[in-house]
Amino acid sequence: MPATFTKSALLLSLMLGLGQAHAAAQPSPVALAASEGIPHPAVIAHRGASFDAPESTAASYKLARDLGADYLEMDLQRSKDGVLFALHDNNLQRTTDVATKFPDRKDSPANAFTMAELKTLDAGSWYNKAYPDRARPSYVGLQILTLDEIIDIAQANPKHKPGLYIETKEPQLFPGIEHDLKEKLQARGLLIPAGAKPAKNVASVGESNGKVILQTFEKNSLELLQKEMPQVPKILLLWVGEGSIEPKSKVTFAESGEKDKNVFYGKQEPKSEAEFKQWIDYAKAQGAIGTGPSAKLTHGGDQSYSDLVQPWMNKYTHDKGLLVHVYTVDEPVDYEKVMAAGVDGIFTNRASELLKFYKRPAAASVDQVLKNNGF
Ligand code: G3P
Ligand code: CA
């Protein structure tokens, strides 16, 4: 073999080899989170500290903030008159007294109400009835909150400003909500400049580049969020079922004979490895910085779904340079399990417990923080 060929071939193979190594190498999840200004592992207070106070109210968000959660999570909707506010369900029945105040419209979606009408609802009393052991008289009369009010809460503690982790909920019901959200974040000074370098030595998440994370289950909404706010970190939420990862079994809940919907969900698994992977590949291609998969919980319950944080799934996601923030986990046995499987952060209703688990316990008890805030 002529010497010249050998040298060229060696050079070529080195270039190819280096090229391959470069393509495969991804920053570690810790480095990736740091580059986005996102704590690792992250404590995401799901609808606020919603185990201890009515979800998505001032009580639950102030509690999560003052316990030291990294993020206040919320499901974003838009009122009839165009105001962005936080509510999880499609209608108001479970978490408000709409049936008493607006009996004829009790089944209507929340976007059929003006913000003034929504503000007349009691979003706290349901909690006292559902959880008498955690009830407080001060929860009676709590209001649904606008996004503006949640931003005010997030910024009000000078010692700790959590970030906002905002889900576009059922975005097909709210055409243009991605644009509205951009305008609101811009107006409130919460949009980081495009190409901004990670802010150094910030005191809290709320001052970092990761001060806002956007999340959605919907491909279309992810694409719109990316178009509107390319510089803001985004998470594609995942579950197994309609509109998301295709299940292996075509048997429906009604056909399954299961009595408990979440037992049924817990048994669901992706149709194939390839089916799971294509969702991760899609998230990456659309500019997401990570995924938000469901978890199967040890003791079941209405937040237990398909196990989408198996170690091979997390490894595949990490190998693509994406983070994994799992929802919604409340017990140490499950914190252990999902952390061992490799996740990078947890949505939890029990911020106080997760902070303890991560050895970042709050300085004051849940009871004390609630009292400090007048609850
Ligand atoms: O946003 C993550 C998690 O909250 C998804 O579930 O139904 O509580 O919004 P859901
Ligand atoms: Ca949510």
Image (cartoon, rainbow, N blue to C red):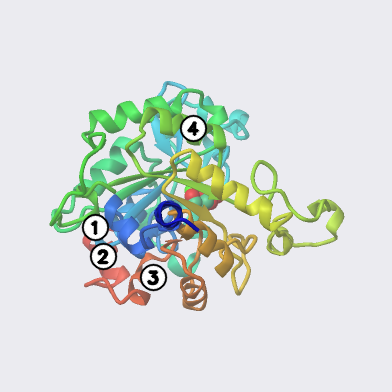
Decide which of tag 4 and tag 2 comes sooner along the chain: 4
Q: Are marks 2 and 1 in contact (CB under 8 Å)?
A: yes
In this rendering, is residue 84 above or below 300? above
Q: Is residue 8 left or right of residue 274?
A: left
Decide which of tag 2 and tag 3 comes sooner along the chain: 3
Q: Residues within 10 Å of mark 4 (few under 14, many from 20)?
A: some
Name the image quarter holding the C terminus: bottom left
Q: Where is mark 2, residue-wise?
A: 369
Q: Quadrant of residue 51?
A: bottom left
Q: CA distance from mark 2 to mark 1?
A: 6 Å
Decide which of tag 4 and tag 1 comes sooner along the chain: 4
Rendered location of residue 169, percent (x, y): 51, 39
Residue 373's disc is 1
Q: Where is mark 3, residue-wise?
A: 354
Q: Identity of the amino acid at label 4?
A: Glu
Residue 223's disc is 4
Circle 1: element type:
loop
Q: Identity of the amino acid at label 3?
A: Leu
Q: Are marks 4 and 1 in contact (CB under 8 Å)?
A: no
Beta carbon of the mark 4 residue lies under 8 A of ligand 1: no
